[in-house]
Image (cartoon, rainbow, N blue to C red):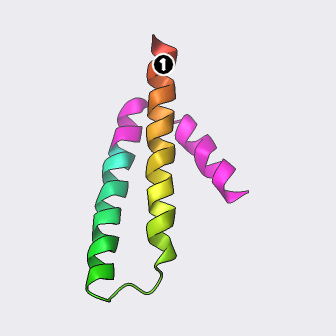
Amino acid sequence: MKTTKYVEDLRSKSTAELNEELVAAKKELFNLRFQNATNQLDNTSRIKEVRRNIARIQSIITEKANAAQ
């Protein structure tokens, strides 16, 4: 499955890399919302996908923080 591969890739990254990816995903979400508001967005399901990816990244960051304690 595509999602499990993505999560495995995230788990192999360091916390700093995850934070960079989180910032990039949030920027992408902002741009998608802006395009949606101006009726320029063709694939609206991409917003949902990016939101879920942000949640996945945040979950893995939390897991790594809890494991370090």
Q: Amino acid at mark 1?
A: Asn
**Residue 27, position in %: x, y?**
29, 60
Secondary structure beneath label 1: helix
- Looking at the image, which residue is at 43% across and 50% down? 54
- Looking at the image, which residue is at 56% across and 36% down? 11
Q: Is residue 19 above or below residue 47?
A: above
Can you say which quadrant of the picture contains the C terminus?
Answer: top left
- Looking at the image, which residue is at 49% across and 65% down? 48
**Residue 36, position in %: x, y?**
33, 80
- Looking at the image, which residue is at 51% across and 74% down? 45
Residue found at the very far top of the displayed protein: 69
Asked which quadrant contains residue 25, the reply is bottom left
**Residue 6, position in %: x, y?**
60, 50
Q: Is residue 59 above or below residue 33?
A: above
Q: Is residue 45 above or below residue 68?
A: below
Residue stretch in magenta? 1-19
The verdict on residue 28 being magenta is no
Q: Judge the density around disc 1: few (<14), some (14-19), many (≥20) Cα neighbours within 10 Å.
A: few
Can you say which quadrant of the picture contains the N terminus?
Answer: bottom right
Q: In the shown orientation, is residue 31 left or right of residue 68?
A: left
Residue found at the very far right of the displayed protein: 1
Dominant secondary structure, magenta = helix
Q: Which residue is mark 1?
A: 66
The verdict on residue 18 being magenta is yes
